[in-house]
């Protein structure tokens, strides 16, 4: 009986062993400051060294800690590696190894771009949540499986060395993205929106952060330029004209806007056009009715505005050269001529009367 009891105790301990070891899972963190600019292009070749089997990021995959393991991954790193040339075998091997080695392990997504969580939560908590979701969805697409979130890693950091210009750039760009998505479908700006998290990374030199901030502004300008009005010069020769105005939508989704038009002076009259639907990847030409009041040079300021009348992109100037006399001007000119003629006759009559006296 004692032997049987001893065996039962040993069996019980063996059954408990897996659960005990599960509490000591090894955490493997895959993060790296971005090596891409905001156009998605690599700015250096440092990743090749890091991803090699003897590199810092390569060792974690090719010589990993023993199971059980928990992988904490920033999907921005995967996007960086995927941006490397297809003929780069180091990058391709690293991606395949990541899919293979994590297949039976727990995987958790870190915030996209791995920004300073303490700092990001103070500046824009809703955006920080977006960075987590963006990283999770990209990881799931890459690994072809469900992953969870780890929102606590790095949360204890209390001190930031992020330069003020990087903070200003981050806030300005974030607010600008939020504003233009009142017209541009939000999904069109997902890549830029996620990437600006890299402005809040601590492990960057001041020079690299300044370069990223400048690059982010240029990327935002490039995105806004996808929606634009083509400038033009027009000659008007009649009282009622129709001016062709071309609007470009280089986004992949249709966009609804209002074309706001204002004249530099009263020489012409024009009205705005509401709720214009611009097909994706299109050039839409509108015939805008214009009423001519007086000849001369003038211009129209053309803007694409949202429902509140705020311009979404930089206004465009349409130059007008008007060489026509409208009926109003003709009546005014004729009336003035008649008055001058009558005045001349009256003066002649007075001269004749004075001469007879």
Image (spheres, rainbow, N blue to C red):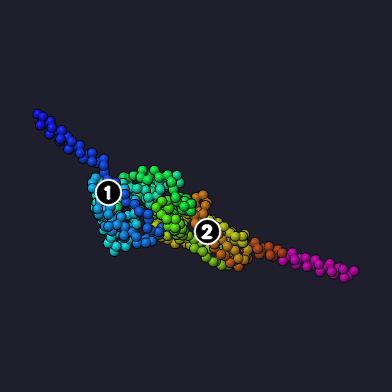
Q: Nearer the viewer, residue 180 or 92?
A: 92
Horizontal relation, residue 317 to residue 124: left or right: right
Q: Which residue is mark 2?
A: 315
Tag 1's secondary structure?
A: loop
Nearest to the observer: residue 152 or residue 252: 152
Say whether residue 182 is left or right of residue 41: right
Is residue 60 in view?
A: yes
Label total for image: 2
Answer yes or no: is residue 189 visible: no
Q: Quadrant of the N terminus?
A: top left
Residues in magenta? 337-357
Residue 260 percent across, percent down from the top left: 53, 56
Q: In the rendered structure, which disc, 2 or 1, sits on the residue that comes first in sequence?
A: 1
Look at 37% across and 58% down and name the residue there: 35
Residue farthest toward the right in the current orientation of the protein: 357
Taking the spot 34% from the left edge, 57% from the top edge, the residue there is 80
């Amino acid at each position: 009986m004692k032997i049987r009891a001893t065996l039962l105790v040993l069996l019980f301990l063996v059954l408990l062993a897996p659960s005990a070891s599960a509490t000591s899972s090894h955490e493997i963190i895959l993060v790296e400051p971005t090596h891409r600019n905001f156009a998605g292009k690599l700015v250096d070749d440092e990743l090749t060294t890091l991803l090699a089997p003897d590199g810092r990021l390569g060792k974690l995959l090719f010589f990993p800690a023993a199971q059980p393991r928990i992988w904490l991954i920033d999907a921005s790193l995967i996007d960086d590696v995927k941006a490397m040339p297809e003929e780069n075998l180091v990058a391709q091997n690293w991606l395949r190894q990541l899919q293979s080695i994590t297949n039976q392990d727990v995987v958790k997504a870190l915030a996209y771009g791995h920004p300073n969580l303490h700092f990001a939560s103070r500046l824009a908590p809703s955006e920080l949540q977006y960075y987590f979701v963006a990283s999770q969805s990209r990881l799931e697409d890459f690994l072809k499986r469900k992953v969870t979130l780890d929102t606590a890693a790095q949360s204890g950091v209390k001190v930031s060395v992020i330069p003020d210009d990087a903070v200003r750039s981050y806030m300005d760009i974030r607010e600008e993205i939020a504003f233009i998505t009142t017209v541009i479908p939000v999904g069109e700006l997902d890549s830029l929106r996620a990437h600006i998290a890299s402005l809040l990374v601590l492990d960057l030199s001041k020079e690299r952060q300044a370069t990223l901030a400048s690059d982010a502004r240029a990327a935002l300008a490039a995105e806004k330029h996808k929606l634009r009005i083509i400038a033009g010069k027009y000659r008007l020769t009649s009282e009622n004209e129709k001016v062709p105005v071309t609007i470009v939508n280089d986004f992949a989704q249709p966009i609804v806007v209002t074309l706001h038009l204002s004249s530099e002076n009263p020489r012409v009259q024009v009205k705005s056009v509401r709720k214009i639907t611009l097909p994706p990847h299109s050039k839409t030409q509108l015939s805008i009715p214009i009423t001519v009041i007086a000849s001369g040079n003038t211009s129209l300021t053309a803007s694409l505005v949202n429902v509140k009348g705020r311009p979404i992109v930089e206004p465009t100037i349409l130059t007008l050269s008007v060489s026509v006399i409208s009926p109003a001007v003709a009546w005014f000119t004729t009336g003035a001529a008649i008055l001058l003629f009558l005045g001349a006759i009256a003066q002649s009559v007075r001269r004749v009367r004075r001469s007879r006296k």
